[in-house]
Amino acid sequence: MELLELLKERYSVRKYSERPVEQEKLDKIIEAAMVAPSAKNFQPVRIYELKSEEAIARIRGITRCAYNAPVVMMVTVDKNIEWHNELEEGVTSGQQDAAIAATHMMLEAASLGIGSVWVCWFPNTAVHEAFELPENEKVVLLMPMGYAADDSKPVANHFNKISKEEMVREL
């Protein structure tokens, strides 16, 4: 399948089957994140595979947006090694680096037949504390993933896209 076709077919899965995801596929998804570019190649992204019964129960107890997926990837940034823009105070690369790595993961998952959904709606501090993350790490997103349930489908507005004229500005 060509990349553009994959991009058009992929949707955010919010209903998963109970079928476990094979470790070989999870390893490929992680590898996709590992080859993602990062600012100055500092590589501040850290990924936690939440897949044990205990970890899954814990994340489901914190947010309903785990969608009963068998695996939830938690993407964090190490604030001690993210790139800092010397030209402007407070501008760092961590969020962007995490977004690039997560996008790689999401697309590799889709290419392997694994559904996923990018989740930002959760209490970051509660997740950080529940998983006893190091102080220097910031939780950026959760990515539940697994095989889509037979009756899974995109949300109603999934195919509503703005026009090229609305999105692109020529200067």
Image (spheres, rainbow, N blue to C red):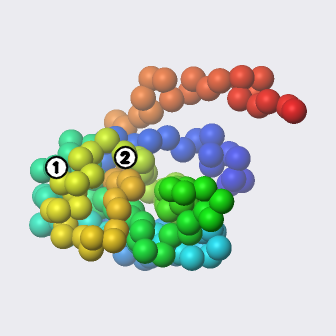
Left or right of residue 22: residue 81: right
Left or right of residue 30: residue 146: left
Q: Earlier in the sequence, mark 1 or mark 2?
A: 1
- Other residues around mark 2 within 10 Å, as few (<14) / some (14–19) / many (≥20): some
Q: State the image quarter where residue 132 is shown.
A: bottom left
Q: Which residue is mark 1?
A: 62
The image's mark for residue 26 is none
Q: Residue at x 62, y 76 (%)?
A: 41
Which quarter of the image is occupied by the C terminus?
top right
Which one is nearer the viewer's eye here, 160 or 134? 134
Q: Quick one: SS at disc 2?
A: loop
Is residue 57 depicted above or below 152 in this figure? below
Q: Amino acid at mark 2?
A: Val
Left or right of residue 167: residue 96: left
Q: Amino acid at mark 1?
A: Ile
Q: Which residue is mark 2?
A: 119
Residue 37 is situated, as x and y percent measured from the top left of the image, at: 63, 69
- What distance separates the C-alpha of mark 1 from that of mark 2? 13 Å
Residue 19 is situated, as x and y percent measured from the top left of the image, at: 28, 59
Which quarter of the image is occupied by the N terminus?
bottom right
Q: Residue at x 41, y 47 (%)?
A: 117
